[in-house]
Image: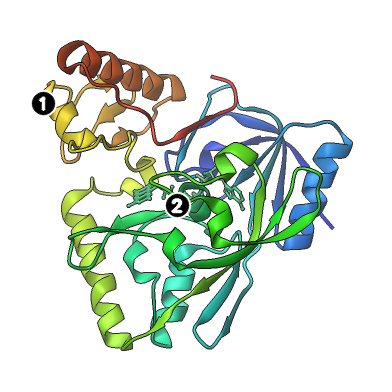
Amino acid sequence: MINILQSVPLAQYTTFGIGGPADYFVIATSKDELVEAVLYAKANSLPFFILGTGANILIGDKGFRGLVIKNEAKNITIHNAQVTAEGGVIIADVIAKTQQIGLSGFEHYAGIPSTVGGALWQNLHFLSADRTYTEYIGSIVKSAHILQKDATVKEVKADYFEFTYDWSILHKTHEIVLDATFQLKQDDPQTIQKRIEENLKWRNEKHPENAVKTSAGSIFKKLEGYGAGRLIQQVGLSGYKSGGAEVSTKHSNFIINTGNATALDVRNIIDKIQKTITDQLGLVLETEISFIGEF
Ligand SMILES: Cc1cc2nc3c(=O)[nH]c(=O)nc-3n(C[C@H](O)[C@H](O)[C@H](O)COP(=O)(O)OP(=O)(O)OC[C@H]3O[C@@H](n4cnc5c(N)ncnc54)[C@H](O)[C@@H]3O)c2cc1C
């Protein structure tokens, strides 16, 4: 049974800590509740938005006119080397469970805030253990159950998602991941643990302190051959401020909420960076994060 709330501030549900109220808000704790919430939105002609850990979005200061469905469907089952996780499962929880039993595949994403649904939506990625290539979550997806536009459930294989850098077909179809099955590999738990620790150490060294509570990670997609952070540094915008938001001086592709930033402050910085990069370098930086609701 779902419990629809009204006028719920969304800042607390995002890693940026920014965002106005949702007119309607519900926490779905199972696949069935998630479907029920979507049907409720459809029956009441409400626009709806599926929220994971809110780590790749900027929600506008005026909030969201419709129903925000926070996905906390968290069931995980493991058979041999296959893991099936509901869309609201936190990636850190899968990492902990699979490391313990010597299953490798998720450890590359240690330290990244994400649900399974958000990870498939954006094809979660990080550098390989030897740092020579990029690991994508799409490469371990075997199949998934998705809720289609007409509210029917379909089982799809990995290729359905057309995973590429920062992209899956979900950007186009806006279908919802109910659960996904991943194919992992047997490995030594201690070796996996070592990779986790090295990834966490890397993040500690390169990312701004407390980034999981004050930012949405990298704001811009990388360009072929250029890291966005380096370009931002090159045009002198490292440390640039607008209101309570500021470009990190440690990693310039991060914008930090220093305490009282508004969505508009962040938008101002994004606009300033994009304009400066184009004017000075003739390059176009695209955002990796999504803008949700009214600004
Ligand atoms: C400090 C920090 C570091 C980061 N580092 C990385 C990194 O190294 N690599 C990387 O790839 N990303 C990184 N990110 C970005 C972010 O963690 C990922 O994009 C993550 O996958 C977002 O998942 P989420 O659950 O928070 O999704 P949300 O931000 O809540 O939502 C993002 C999108 O996914 C959609 N969505 C969520 N659940 C579902 C579902 N069940 N079905 C369909 N659509 C759904 C939402 O509707 C929305 O459009 C970082 C972010 C932070 C804050």
Pointer 2 with pointer 1, Cβ within 8 A: no
Could you classify mark 2 by the number of other residues whose Cα lies within 10 Å: few (under 14), some (14-19), or many (20 or more)? many
What's the residue type where badge 2 is placed? Asn
Residue 110 shows in this picture:
no
Q: Position of residue 193 (x, y in %)?
A: 29, 79
Measuring 44% from the left and 24% from the top, which residue is drawn there? 262
Task: Report which residue position mark 2 lands on.
Answer: 123
Which mark identifies residue 234?
1
Mark 2 C-beta to ligand 1 under 8 Å: yes
Amino acid type at mark 1: Gln
In the image: residue 111, left or right of residue 14 = left
In this rendering, the answer to whether 11 lies above or below 283 is below
Circle 2 — which element? loop
Ligand 1 closer than 8 Å to label 1 CB: no
Q: Is residue 55 above or below residue 63?
A: below
Question: Who's the residue at 30% across and 79% down the image?
Answer: 192
* Apparent side of residue 68 relative to residue 191 in the rendered image (left or right): right
Residue 61 shows in the view: yes
Which of the two discs, 2 and 1, labels the residue nearer the N terminus?
2
Along the viewing direction, whichever of 294 and 142 lies nearer the viewer: 142
Identify the residue at image location x=53%, y=25%: 60
Q: Is residue 175 above or below residue 113?
A: above
Callout 1: 10 Å neighbours few (<14), some, many (20+)? some
